[in-house]
Amino acid sequence: MRFGTDGIRGVYPSEINETTARSLGFALSAMRPGCVTVVGRDTRSSGESLADALCSAIEYCGGIAIDVGIVPTAGVAYLTSEYSADFGVVVSASHNPREYNGLKVFGRGGFKLSDAEEKRVEALLSSAPVKAHGGRRIRAGGAVRTYAAYIASKAGGCLSGVRVLLDCADGAAGAAAPLAFELAGACATCINTRSDGVSVNDGSGALFADRLTEKAKLFDATFAFDGDADRVIALGASGRIVNGDHAVNILAGDMKEKGTLARDSAVGTVMTNSGVEKALAAKGITLVRTAVGDKYVLREMLSEGYKIGGEQAGHVIMSDVLPTGDGIATALALCAVSARKGKSPDELDDAEDMPQFSASVKAQREIVQTDVYMDFMRKFRASRPGCRIVVRASGTEPVIRISAESEDADEAQNAVRELVGFVRRYGEA
């Protein structure tokens, strides 16, 4: 089992199971004997068993496992730092369907592991466990409140009287988002807060935010989270969607006005719409692009001292809050700007997207490394100089993701259609 873009992930139990979780616990213990590890999870039915296997392995090897129960991914990152733990592990498959699960790993301070650290863990996954005395498991009651209180304190303003709708995707947000907004003073209406283990991301949350357009018109702001709440999609009172790109545009613009935007720059990815880049530039803000993946966004932020970055899908990192994407903290920050300026999130957003079309094809990831693919793409790009094209292998699924952007919508749409056809001919799984 190998690390992808965001941890180890697969279908349960065929691709990831209790043996995988125990192996990770043994590997972390071999990497740092006697380690203290915070373990949290989302609401998937397989999560409790996987978390139990992980905790048992750490305890067997003489470490301390702090079981915080159902907590958003960013909550585990915060608690890893708050408890001065060596590692934090989230049992979650984020936005993926319920049949998936995964293991996300944080190191000291709540930072995601570096590539070198991930490779070291991978090399230790097959290591034989070494039993040691002194191991124990602590069940940390109140961990969710500790995290919620922290992000509420970082909201950036009083939300008293602000009416918000929170779609918790029947995931980990249900345990923390209502509490965080209550502590910040907002009047929150919450939907999809079940923890039944089978409905996570099922027709609700960030992937289905477009289903909230009518409901959103009854609130000052609406926020839809994914299964582990590390991403958020916002909607304004008009029902218009504000994705991660546009959230960065709003928040970076506000920071620029307040004089707190480091180096007058924000970080996005190769998928960030050029319309957002143009809107940022009009405010005197430079967009710095990275590869897709919030760990690459964070790496650039840490390397260059940038304060905000994010992805179109809804991951937004505010380094003064946490060193990872936090959908709930992002929603609170957007609410604070809205309350201060008396405008809903869509009214605050001055970016107009350039036509951009995307598609995903189930295919062998290796196709993007073949000579046939590279030769085809070289000629394809040369024939469409006005079209910005991104083709990448998913880091979490056997899927090739295709995107094209152009001022000419037909050109972009046709480019995606042709690329889908190529992938299906030569690499479909």
Image (tube, rainbow, N blue to C red):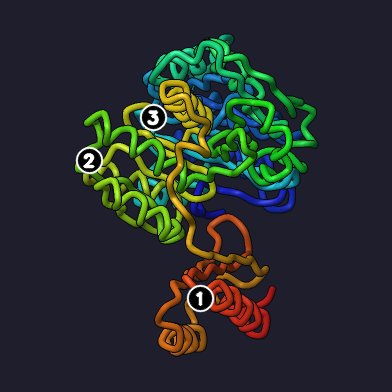
Measure the C-alpha gap from mark 3 to mark 2.
14 Å
Residue 380, given in percent of the width and then of the height, sits at 48, 86
Q: Residue at x 50, y 76 (%)?
A: 368
360 shown above or below 417: above
Name the residue that disc number 2 marks. 305
Could you tell me if residue 294 is visible in this image? yes
Q: What residue did someone put label 3 on?
A: 322
Quarter of the image with the N terminus in it: bottom right
Q: Position of residue 346 (x, y in %)?
A: 52, 39
Where residue 332 appears, as percent x and y from the top left, is 49, 24
Question: How crowded is the residue under tag 2: few (<14 C-alpha within 10 Å), some, or many (20+)?
Answer: some
Q: Is residue 257 above or below residue 119?
A: above
What's the distance in space between the residues labelled 2 and 1, CA to CA? Answer: 32 Å
Of labels 1 and 3, earlier in sequence is 3
Confirm or deny contact between disc 3 and disc 2 (CB under 8 A).
no
Q: How many marks?
A: 3
For residue 32, say whether it is visible: no
**Residue shown at 37%/34% (left/top)?**
318
Front residue of 61 and 405: 405
- Sequence-first tag of 2 and 1: 2
Residue 310 or residue 356, whichever sits in front: 356
Say which element carries label 1.
helix
- Say which amino acid is labelled 2: Gly
